[in-house]
Image (spheres, rainbow, N blue to C red):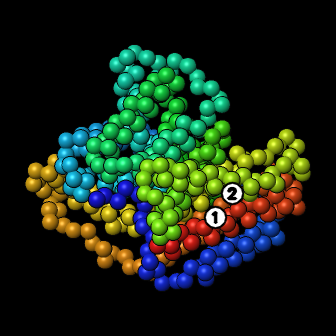
Amino acid sequence: MVPAHGVGTRSDLPVPLGPAAAAASVTLIISFVVLAFLWRSPRSPGGGRPLPRVVTDVVDHPATRTTVRAVALAVLIAVINIGFVGPDDPSDNVAPWAFYVTFWAGLVPLSLLLGPVVRYANPLRLLHRIVTGALRIDPDGLRTPPASVGYWPAAASLTAFAWLELVAPGRAEPATVAGFLAGYAVVQVAAATVFGARWFDRGDGFEVYSSLIGGLSPVGRLDDGRFGLRNPLDGLERLAPGPGLVGVVVALVGTTGYDGISRTTWWTSTVTEGVLGGTLGLAATTLAVGVIYLLGCAALTPHGAHEGQRPGPATFATTLAPIAAGYAIAHYFSLLVFDGQQTFILAGDPLGTGADLLGLAGTRIDYTLLGPIAIMAVQLLAIVTGHLVASVAAHDRAVRLYRSEDAVRTQYPMLAAMVALTIGAVGLLFAG
């Protein structure tokens, strides 16, 4: 059966849990102390090294963007069709592998490398343009969505996907995958038809996720609009804040946390397997992450803030992006490396007719590419680095909003929250 969730924890990781969790936590605390003493004023965002002008010209050309989206739309349609009419066995149908492994597990590393790739290649944006053109409807929409809606549709769609991926019965069945993709496309395009193409900016969970993680990419827009190499922290400042953004990042961290905890021996021996237990567990884990984050924001009050600033949980929402990225890499890294091979193997015979379109007939997944030590190193490095970058981003934002002595004070609860999340994340890697 297709693994319809992230990579499983490994019992053969060669480092004991206690020292690993302690080392990660101490690293985070030491970094906080160093920041408190040496980082007393906000850095100046902007700048960077521009790439050759031809890069921006080619990427921004309408023909390039349309071609990329047309290819993505063709792939989406093919995956949906294969899911419905291809082999019934998930092990022989490329649709679940393409969606759960190549797309979902590959979204984070690709966005970290190249920026908000889903926004650029989003096939639903092209489909929306086709639909509005055929119906002769203004692509800017019929009405403006209420400001209070914000990113909540994206948070809801990401949670719905997580439920499908981790809880839903028959989640690996090709028809289930195809049905979800088709339904998701219909809902998103219909909403964009009413509210305009701007709907995707905050309503498409996959696009918002990619944009959030893509803010950490060293490649991005500079102040003059050109593509260039930049400080990744600058990208976190570019995502427009709004209602529901906290919900998005909490959903990402919480659902990935549930992915880990649901595969521990404690969970499998304590919780009765089924939709109800899985749904409650998913909700509880996400809620727990939300509570931890809000407790970390307990000291964010207007007292001591610069004039006109009213810091709150939403102010620091994007600083959770590095943590979400670290969790995703830790949980999905080996899944992408190993099972990602199966997508291409099955793509050579998409309908199960015996075709060999890619010359990969008879090929098997090569599990010798990485050993347990390499996997452990990547997992621990991803989690610790994610929390370190989040700590730096939160501290820099704090000194931007508060006087330096008040900025450090406001970060004590956030440090405690990050240490708790770090210990929990490392613990899940070793639970099995």
Q: Is residue 358 above or below residue 428?
A: above
Residue linked to disc 1: 421
Of 24 and 41, nearer the camera is 24
- Element under label 2? helix
Q: How many marks?
A: 2
Q: Is residue 134 visible?
A: yes
Residue 187, by quadrant, is top left
Apparent side of residue 419 relative to residue 253 in the rendered image (left or right): right
Quote the CA–CA distance across marks 1 and 2: 8 Å
Extreme residue in the left direction: 354
Q: Is residue 328 above or below residue 290?
A: below
Tell me if mark 2 has few (under 14), some (14-19) or many (20+) residues whose alpha carbon lies within 10 angstroms of its own.
Answer: some
Residue linked to disc 2: 292
Of 262 and 255, nearer the camera is 262
Q: Are marks 1 and 2 in contact (CB under 8 Å)?
A: yes
Q: Is residue 332 above or below residue 200?
A: below
Q: What residue is shown at x 24% (from left), y 41% (from top)? A: 84
Q: Earlier in the sequence, mark 1 or mark 2?
A: 2
Residue 389, by quadrant, is bottom right
